[in-house]
Image (cartoon, coloured by chain):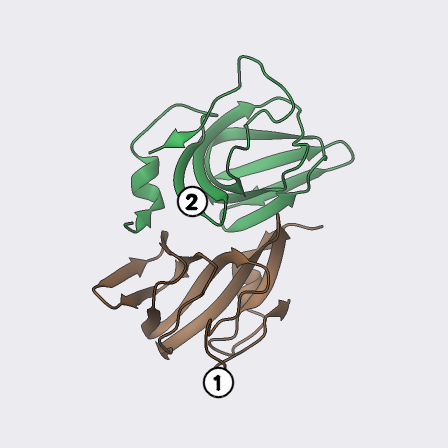
Chain colours: A green, B brown
Amino acid sequence: MDKVNLAEKLSTFSERWQPHIVGELNGQHVKIAKILGDFVWHHHEAEDELFLVVKGSITIRLRDRDVNLKEGEFFIVPRGVEHCPVAKEEAHIVLFEPAGTLNTGNLQNDRTYEATPI
Amino acid sequence: MDKVNLAEKLSTFSERWQPHIVGELNGQHVKIAKILGDFVWHHHEAEDELFLVVKGSITIRLRDRDVNLKEGEFFIVPRGVEHCPVAKEEAHIVLFEPAGTLNTGNLQNDRTYEATPI
């Protein structure tokens, strides 16, 4: 495989809340996404999910607190924990999670998007 | 758990080639390290290894080519593939790999360092 330049890959799409796969290793996917506004509350039954901010800032709302992340910061949402990512301005993130993890976790709705390689 | 600020965590140590664990998810570890100079040629028998550069630039030497990475770029070394990371000036990297992965892979020598949480 080739190396991946995150900014370059992020420049190839503009849709928000649609994760794209940029790497696969040990049964895990590395994904990138652009986000803006509020997502939906959901959880992942059996997958821990890492959010790393590479541009802008985001908040990961948990039921008992907010986790504010800026560029160069990451947070791991443990499996089973309800969360709702939000971004006041467009932010760019890297996700690290098991292959097959769905963006809306336990839900299937109009925000559900099956990630594909980019 | 708390969020992790990569630069902040990297400011807490100065040793080179000694990965520290900053996150764990799905049986994988997120590690950070400072590197300078040449490491040793090695491979990981059963682990794919992701190198993401967060400061400076590095080269991952493979037997058939060099992969040059600068800030914001990553490369996945597939299991079994011999590699030798090098950095002309100090660089800071993030590693994603299965928990228990040893920095020197198939080798045990004076560069071997068992990563611990930081």
Q: Chain of mark 1?
A: B
**Foreground of the two, B8 or A94:** A94
* Residue positioned 60% across, 31% down in the render: A85
The spot of residue A1 in percent (x, y) is: 29, 49
Q: Secondary structure at mark 2?
A: strand
* Residue positioned 52% across, 64% down in the render: B32
A67 in relation to B54, above or below:
above
Q: Which residue is mark 1?
A: B109
* Residue positioned 33% across, 43% down in the render: A7
Q: What amino acid is at disc 2? A: Glu
Q: What amino acid is at disc 1? A: Asn
The spot of residue A53 in percent (x, y) is: 50, 43
Q: Which residue is mark 2?
A: A24
Label 2 CA crowd tier, 10 Å (few <14, some 14–19, many 20+):
some
Q: Secondary structure at mark 1?
A: loop
Quadrant containing the C terminus of chain B is bottom right
